[in-house]
Amino acid sequence: MLVVVVRTLILYVVVIIALRLMGKREIGQLQPFELVVILMISELAAVPSENVGVPLLSGIIPILVLLAASLTFAYASLKSEKARDIICGRPSILIDRGKILEKELRKNCYNISDLLEELRLNNIPNIADVEFAILENNGQISVFPKSNKRPAIPEDFNISPPYEGLPLPIIMDGKLKTDYLKQREKDLNWLKSELKKYDIDRIEDVLLASLDSSGNLYVQPKTRR
């Protein structure tokens, strides 16, 4: 039993390292060749972990080969547009200037129901409001509504809103992030003074405190037990 546990942990670490080297992407954002590699890696790792009679290297070596192949394809697609088209394919325009392209739907095995569902997921219930819809290589659809149907933005009204930076978590789960505090040009005395406005005397009692670029502090205290 101990042998099985050790072999499984070794394969687990190898698979985690392989996936990390492939990059950080969600499953829905994977290119086809990346998805194939992940499926094959999972199968190759399962066999040695289930069967002690199979040498551990019989699982590790194929995984490393697949990782090398994946990184090679990724590098080739990065450096060559032609290789990228061959390996990853090209996006397909399903709706062009408000008109559904039936040929592209058939080519991609996409039916009208699938198209309407994707539009609803993009918060567009009426297909008549769509100017362009593009099926990306990862299977997701990018939707561009008609100009008179898109949401209004401040630029439409000649408004220039103030800059909004990224809020920084000053305190997370009772632990102070001093680097973020200094980045906002604040000190510990200022923070304690602000926390007292929320009847909080200790940093350890704060679940989350974030500070935006305008100096506004958001504080969520821990639930008292």
Image: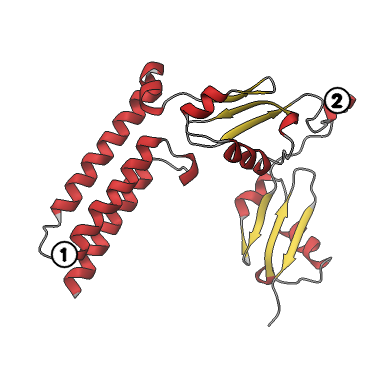
**In the displayed structure, does residue 72 sit left or right of residue 93?**
left
- Give residue 144's position: percent from left, percent from top: 68, 28
Q: Is residue 101 above or below residue 23?
A: above
Label 2 crowd (10 A; few <14 / some 14-19 / many >=20)? few
Seen at 71% across and 54% down, the residue is 210
How far is mark 2 from mark 1, CA to CA? 65 Å
Amino acid marked by disc 1: Asn
Amino acid marked by disc 2: Asp
**In the displayed structure, does residue 110 sit left or right of residue 223?**
left
**Frontmost residue, 220 versus 58:** 58
- Give residue 106's position: percent from left, percent from top: 49, 28
Seen at 34% across and 27% down, the residue is 75
Q: Which mark is residue 221?
A: none
**Frontmost residue, 112 versus 45:** 112
Seen at 80% across and 51% down, the residue is 216
Seen at 55% across and 36% down, the residue is 111
Query: For numbered disc 1, what is the local secondary structure?
Result: loop
Question: Which quadrant of the figure has residue 224?
Answer: bottom right
**Frontmost residue, 167 versus 15:** 15
